[in-house]
Image (cartoon, rainbow, N blue to C red):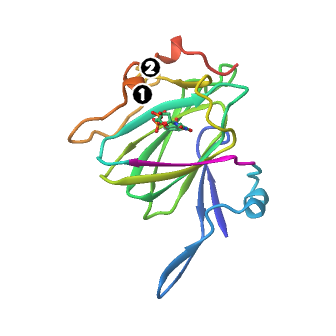
Protein backbone atom coordinates (compact mmCIF):
# COMPACT_ATOMS: atom_id res chain seq x y z
CA UNK A 1 0.00 0.00 0.00
CA UNK A 2 3.11 2.11 0.02
CA UNK A 3 5.75 2.58 -2.65
CA UNK A 4 9.12 3.67 -1.25
CA UNK A 5 12.05 4.79 -3.41
CA UNK A 6 15.47 5.77 -2.09
CA UNK A 7 16.90 8.99 -3.50
CA UNK A 8 20.66 9.27 -3.98
CA UNK A 9 21.37 10.62 -0.47
CA UNK A 10 21.33 8.31 2.55
CA UNK A 11 17.92 8.04 4.21
CA UNK A 12 16.11 10.43 1.84
CA UNK A 13 13.00 8.71 0.50
CA UNK A 14 10.19 9.31 -1.94
CA UNK A 15 7.01 7.69 -0.68
CA UNK A 16 3.90 7.17 -2.74
CA UNK A 17 0.90 5.93 -0.76
CA UNK A 18 -1.75 4.04 -2.71
CA UNK A 19 -4.78 6.01 -3.84
CA UNK A 20 -8.00 4.02 -3.79
CA UNK A 21 -9.93 5.57 -6.65
CA UNK A 22 -13.62 5.23 -7.37
CA UNK A 23 -16.38 7.22 -9.05
CA UNK A 24 -16.29 9.80 -6.23
CA UNK A 25 -12.58 10.48 -6.36
CA UNK A 26 -10.01 8.71 -4.19
CA UNK A 27 -9.09 7.81 -0.63
CA UNK A 28 -5.52 7.64 0.57
CA UNK A 29 -3.72 6.98 3.86
CA UNK A 30 -1.04 9.66 3.97
CA UNK A 31 0.44 8.43 7.28
CA UNK A 32 -0.10 5.14 9.05
CA UNK A 33 2.33 4.33 11.85
CA UNK A 34 2.18 0.54 11.28
CA UNK A 35 2.38 0.55 7.49
CA UNK A 36 5.24 3.05 7.46
CA UNK A 37 7.10 1.06 10.16
CA UNK A 38 6.72 -2.06 7.98
CA UNK A 39 8.35 -0.07 5.18
CA UNK A 40 11.26 0.82 7.50
CA UNK A 41 10.04 4.30 8.47
CA UNK A 42 9.58 4.22 12.24
CA UNK A 43 9.12 7.79 13.39
CA UNK A 44 7.19 9.63 16.08
CA UNK A 45 5.76 12.87 14.77
CA UNK A 46 4.86 15.60 17.24
CA UNK A 47 3.85 18.57 15.07
CA UNK A 48 1.94 19.03 11.81
CA UNK A 49 2.61 22.10 9.65
CA UNK A 50 0.65 23.71 6.84
CA UNK A 51 2.35 26.16 4.51
CA UNK A 52 0.64 28.19 1.80
CA UNK A 53 2.45 30.15 -0.91
CA UNK A 54 0.43 32.48 -3.10
CA UNK A 55 2.79 32.78 -6.05
CA UNK A 56 4.99 30.56 -8.15
CA UNK A 57 8.66 31.14 -7.27
CA UNK A 58 8.21 31.36 -3.49
CA UNK A 59 11.43 29.85 -2.20
CA UNK A 60 11.65 28.70 1.44
CA UNK A 61 14.95 27.36 2.72
CA UNK A 62 17.39 25.96 3.24
CA UNK A 63 16.24 25.19 6.79
CA UNK A 64 17.03 22.83 9.66
CA UNK A 65 17.03 22.65 13.44
CA UNK A 66 20.25 21.79 15.25
CA UNK A 67 20.54 18.94 17.77
CA UNK A 68 19.14 18.29 20.29
CA UNK A 69 16.04 19.65 18.47
CA UNK A 70 16.74 18.22 15.00
CA UNK A 71 13.67 17.17 13.01
CA UNK A 72 12.81 14.45 10.52
CA UNK A 73 10.22 15.86 8.10
CA UNK A 74 7.59 14.11 6.00
CA UNK A 75 6.18 16.47 3.37
CA UNK A 76 3.44 16.33 0.80
CA UNK A 77 1.70 18.82 -1.44
CA UNK A 78 -2.10 19.07 -1.33
CA UNK A 79 -2.44 21.82 -3.92
CA UNK A 80 0.04 22.75 -6.65
CA UNK A 81 3.63 21.52 -6.90
CA UNK A 82 7.12 22.25 -5.63
CA UNK A 83 10.73 21.53 -6.52
CA UNK A 84 11.92 20.15 -3.21
CA UNK A 85 15.59 20.07 -2.21
CA UNK A 86 17.63 18.40 0.51
CA UNK A 87 21.30 19.08 1.31
CA UNK A 88 23.47 16.79 3.41
CA UNK A 89 24.91 18.95 6.21
CA UNK A 90 26.53 16.19 8.28
CA UNK A 91 30.23 17.07 8.31
CA UNK A 92 31.31 13.47 8.80
CA UNK A 93 29.23 12.24 5.85
CA UNK A 94 30.88 11.23 2.55
CA UNK A 95 28.12 13.22 0.80
CA UNK A 96 28.49 16.39 2.94
CA UNK A 97 27.36 19.41 0.89
CA UNK A 98 25.66 17.31 -1.80
CA UNK A 99 22.08 18.07 -2.78
CA UNK A 100 19.20 16.08 -4.20
CA UNK A 101 15.84 17.25 -5.54
CA UNK A 102 12.41 15.83 -6.18
CA UNK A 103 9.27 17.38 -7.64
CA UNK A 104 6.37 16.74 -5.31
CA UNK A 105 2.84 17.60 -6.31
CA UNK A 106 -0.79 17.24 -5.38
CA UNK A 107 -1.34 15.43 -8.66
CA UNK A 108 1.33 12.78 -8.03
CA UNK A 109 0.46 12.44 -4.33
CA UNK A 110 4.09 11.67 -3.56
CA UNK A 111 5.85 12.56 -0.31
CA UNK A 112 9.46 13.18 0.65
CA UNK A 113 11.10 12.06 3.87
CA UNK A 114 13.86 14.44 4.96
CA UNK A 115 15.92 12.91 7.78
CA UNK A 116 17.77 14.76 10.53
CA UNK A 117 21.14 15.99 9.29
CA UNK A 118 19.77 17.55 6.12
CA UNK A 119 18.89 21.14 5.29
CA UNK A 120 15.62 21.42 3.40
CA UNK A 121 14.01 23.89 1.04
CA UNK A 122 11.57 24.19 -1.82
CA UNK A 123 10.36 26.53 -4.50
CA UNK A 124 6.73 26.62 -5.61
CA UNK A 125 6.24 25.81 -9.30
CA UNK A 126 2.69 27.16 -9.54
CA UNK A 127 0.61 29.74 -7.62
CA UNK A 128 -1.56 28.72 -4.66
CA UNK A 129 0.61 25.85 -3.51
CA UNK A 130 -0.09 24.22 -0.16
CA UNK A 131 2.21 21.85 1.71
CA UNK A 132 1.44 19.73 4.71
CA UNK A 133 4.25 18.23 6.72
CA UNK A 134 4.90 16.32 9.88
CA UNK A 135 7.99 16.82 12.05
CA UNK A 136 9.52 14.70 14.84
CA UNK A 137 10.42 17.60 17.14
CA UNK A 138 8.53 20.79 17.75
CA UNK A 139 9.59 24.22 16.57
CA UNK A 140 12.51 25.68 18.49
CA UNK A 141 13.51 29.16 17.28
CA UNK A 142 16.83 28.89 19.20
CA UNK A 143 17.80 25.81 17.16
CA UNK A 144 16.30 26.95 13.85
CA UNK A 145 18.93 27.69 11.15
CA UNK A 146 19.09 28.65 7.47
CA UNK A 147 21.73 28.27 4.77
CA UNK A 148 21.77 30.30 1.58
CA UNK A 149 19.72 28.66 -1.17
CA UNK A 150 22.19 29.84 -3.83
CA UNK A 151 25.46 28.95 -2.07
CA UNK A 152 27.81 28.24 -5.00
CA UNK A 153 29.61 25.63 -2.90
CA UNK A 154 26.38 23.60 -2.93
CA UNK A 155 25.33 24.55 -6.47
CA UNK A 156 21.66 23.65 -6.46
CA UNK A 157 20.15 23.75 -9.97
CA UNK A 158 16.92 25.52 -9.00
CA UNK A 159 14.40 25.70 -11.85
CA UNK A 160 14.34 29.08 -13.59
CA UNK A 161 10.95 30.73 -13.11
CA UNK A 162 9.73 33.73 -15.09
CA UNK A 163 9.15 36.04 -12.10
CA UNK A 164 12.31 35.06 -10.20
CA UNK A 165 12.30 33.96 -6.56
CA UNK A 166 10.48 35.42 -3.57
CA UNK A 167 12.31 34.87 -0.27
CA UNK A 168 11.92 35.89 3.37
CA UNK A 169 14.43 38.40 4.79
CA UNK A 170 15.80 35.64 7.00
CA UNK A 171 16.51 33.42 4.00
CA UNK A 172 18.02 36.23 1.91
CA UNK A 173 20.48 36.96 4.75
CA UNK A 174 21.26 33.32 5.58
CA UNK A 175 24.93 32.30 5.89
CA UNK A 176 26.77 30.10 3.40
CA UNK A 177 27.28 26.45 4.28
CA UNK A 178 30.95 27.13 5.09
CA UNK A 179 29.94 29.70 7.74
CA UNK A 180 26.97 27.84 9.21
CA UNK A 181 26.74 25.73 12.34
CA UNK A 182 25.85 22.25 11.08
CA UNK A 183 25.76 18.60 12.21
CA UNK A 184 28.95 16.79 13.41
C1 LIG B 1 8.82 26.58 11.08
C2 LIG B 1 7.88 27.29 12.06
C3 LIG B 1 7.67 28.65 11.99
N1 LIG B 1 6.84 29.25 12.88
C4 LIG B 1 6.62 30.73 12.75
C5 LIG B 1 7.88 31.56 12.85
C6 LIG B 1 7.58 32.71 11.92
O1 LIG B 1 6.89 33.73 12.64
C7 LIG B 1 6.65 32.14 10.89
C8 LIG B 1 7.34 31.83 9.55
O2 LIG B 1 8.48 31.03 9.82
P1 LIG B 1 9.53 30.69 8.69
O3 LIG B 1 9.83 31.91 7.90
O4 LIG B 1 10.67 29.96 9.32
O5 LIG B 1 8.67 29.68 7.77
P2 LIG B 1 9.17 28.82 6.51
O6 LIG B 1 10.17 29.61 5.76
O7 LIG B 1 8.00 28.29 5.80
O8 LIG B 1 9.94 27.62 7.25
C9 LIG B 1 9.82 26.28 6.83
O9 LIG B 1 10.58 26.13 5.64
C10 LIG B 1 10.67 24.79 5.14
C11 LIG B 1 11.60 24.81 3.94
C12 LIG B 1 11.03 23.80 6.17
O10 LIG B 1 11.77 22.83 5.94
C13 LIG B 1 10.34 23.95 7.48
O11 LIG B 1 10.89 23.08 8.47
C14 LIG B 1 10.34 25.37 7.95
O12 LIG B 1 11.67 25.75 8.31
O13 LIG B 1 6.07 30.96 11.46
C15 LIG B 1 6.19 28.55 13.84
O14 LIG B 1 5.42 29.10 14.67
N2 LIG B 1 6.38 27.20 13.93
C16 LIG B 1 7.20 26.53 13.07
O15 LIG B 1 7.35 25.27 13.16
In the structure shown, which secondary structural element does the residue marked by tag 1 occupy?
loop
- Disc 1 and disc 2 in contact, CB within 8 angstroms: yes
| Point 37% across, 30% down: residue | 168
Magenta segment, which residues? 44-52
The residue wearing badge 2 is: 174
Where is the N terminus found, in terms of image quarters? bottom right
Disc 2 crowd, CA 10 A, few/some/many (<14, 14-19, 20+): many
The kind of secondary structure element at disc 2 is: loop
Indicate left or right for 102 with 18 as reference: left
Q: Earlier in the sequence, mark 1 or mark 2?
A: 1
Task: Identify the main secondary structure in magenta.
Answer: strand
Residue occupied by mark 1: 149
Image height check: is 48 above or below 78? above
Q: Which mark is residue 171?
A: none
Query: Label 1 vs label 2: CA separation?
Result: 8 Å
Image: 69 above or below 19: above
Say which residue appears at 56% left-offset and 76% top-offset.
27
Amino acid sequence: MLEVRALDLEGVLEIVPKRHGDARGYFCETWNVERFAQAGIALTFVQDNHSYSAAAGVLRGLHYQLPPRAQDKLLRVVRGSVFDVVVDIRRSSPTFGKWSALEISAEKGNQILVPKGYAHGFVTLVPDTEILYKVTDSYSPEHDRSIRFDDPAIGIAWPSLAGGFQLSDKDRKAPLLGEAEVFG
